[in-house]
Image (spheres, rainbow, N blue to C red):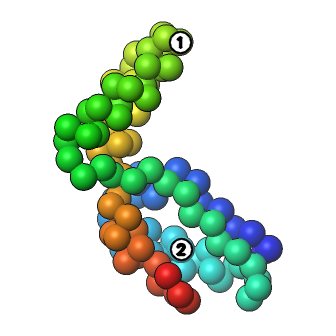
Amino acid sequence: MDLVSFNLGAHHLPDLKTVSKTLDRMERVAKPEGLIYLLDVGRLRTEWLTERFVNVFGQGYLRRGMTRFFSEDFRNSMYAGWLPQELQSAIPFGTQ
């Protein structure tokens, strides 16, 4: 493959070892000159920042009547995100 992507899924995995295994498998299917693209939410440094982020950026969900998504999925995703250095430590190959 020229491009292998993993979008908004890493924070749903149970641990960094599983993230690392997933990235390793992605490398196996990518061409030597291919790209591996990982995009995910990052956990914020404090609970206060996380709640502020959820409440400010989650307003669109509330305006659309998506209260369950706002209170469960969006908020939980923000708390489940990996810290950037944790996610970087899960990269099993090449230069980070």
The amino acid pointed to by label 1 is Arg
Residue at 30% in and 49% down: 44
Marker disc for residue 64: 1
**What residue is disc 2 on?**
23
Report how far apart the C-alphas of labels 2 and 1 lie in the structure. Answer: 35 Å
Choose top left, top right, bottom left or bottom right for residue 19. Answer: bottom left
**Rendered location of residue 64, percent (x, y):** 53, 12
In the depicted view, which residue is nearer to us: 63 or 74? Answer: 63
Choose top left, top right, bottom left or bottom right for residue 58. Answer: top left
Label count reads 2
Which structural element holds mark 2? helix
Choose top left, top right, bottom left or bottom right for residue 47. Answer: top left
Q: Is residue 16 visible?
A: no
**Rendered location of residue 96, percent (x, y):** 50, 82
In the displayed structure, would residue 82 be above or below residue 73? below
Which structural element holds mark 1? loop
The amino acid pointed to by label 2 is Leu
Q: Is residue 2 left or right of residue 18?
A: right
**Rendered location of residue 73, percent (x, y):** 40, 33
**Rendered location of residue 49, percent (x, y):** 26, 40
Q: Is residue 63 visible?
A: yes
Marker disc for residue 41: none
Q: Is residue 29 left or right of residue 93?
A: right
Within 10 angstroms of label 1, few (less than 14), some, or many (20 or more) residues?
A: few
Please state which of the two labelled residues, at mark 2 or mark 1, is closer to the viewer: 1
Residue at 33% in and 69% down: 86
